[in-house]
Structures are given as C-alpha cells and as structure tokens.
Image (cartoon, grey):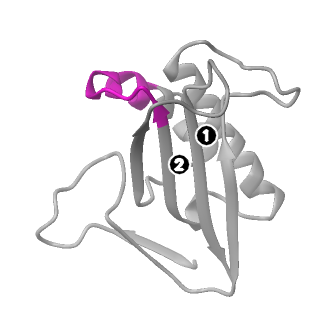
Amino acid sequence: MTVTQFNPEGLPVTDAYHHVAVATGTRHVHVAGQVGWDAQGELVAPDLAGQVAQAYRNVAAALTGVGATFADVVRLTVYVADWDVAQYPAFADGVARVADEIGFTAPPASLVGVQSLFQPGILVEVEATAVLD
C-alpha cells in the first residue's frame, strides 16, 4: 500500500479524518473539485447531505478511472457554501451514506466554508489528491 494514515499522539482522534498521511509512490493524482452532479450534469439533490454523497461518489469514480481508490488518497479539501457548524450533521450524514459504497478511509482533510461556489444551488465541492506506485 502506498498510503498510511494515522493520528499522532497528542492530537485528537476523530472519525471524520486522519491527521497525517504518509505516501510513497511516483504517480500523483489530482482530482478536480467534484460537486453533486450525476453523469448528465444534473444536480442530484437540493440538500447538503445529498450533494455531499454524490460529490464523494464522483471523487470515487474519478479515482477508479485512473486505477485508484480512497485508500490511495492523501488529502481531501472540501468547500461548503454558506458554511455554519450547525450544518455538520448533514455533512457527516452525506459521507456516511456512501462510506461503505466508496471505501471511504477518512484521509487528512480540510473543510473550508466559502461564501458561494461557481453556480447557484451547488452547496459542496470536493477535491482529492492521491498517490500511486
């Protein structure tokens, strides 16, 4: 395996992500921000949980396209429009809906609240970086 994720002593343990990923490999995969669109470019849900689930599915599909999985991901960056901490349960629900389906491994991640994303109605965008041998 090219990626090892862990939580060093002295840092809080969380189910949402690991604090550190160590990667060895030569192929770096950068997945552009994925949103809650289906393959036809249609928004699948008006709510945050539904869009998060689809955005993570889309990241998984992009990874699969190059022979990678979430086990190869060393970094996620998640942008959420009009973020408020009260939205966290909906965000976590979206991830939980697809975690088993996509083999989610909770890589190191940042969640960034933004005023808006590129198009009205888009609530979340997820970028990923992976490393392969």
Residue 60 image point, x, y percent? 68, 48
44 left or right, relative to 126: right
Type of amino acid at the residue the image marks with label 2: Phe
Q: Which residue corresponds to the image point at 59% horizontal and 52% vertical from the top-left?
A: 127
Q: Does the magenta stretch include residue 26?
A: no
Q: What stretch is highlighted in magenta?
A: 80-93
Q: Name the residue under label 2.
A: 104
State the SS at label 2.
loop
Query: Mark 1 and 2 residues: CB-CB less than 8 Å, in contact?
Result: yes
The kind of secondary structure element at disc 1 is: helix
Q: Which label belongs to residue 56?
A: 1
For marks 1 and 2, give the CA distance: 9 Å
Q: Which mark is residue 96?
A: none
Residue farthest left in this picture: 10
Report the front residue among 16 and 102. Answer: 16
What's the residue at 16%, 64% (across, down)? Answer: 11
Up/down of 35 relative to 107, above or below? above
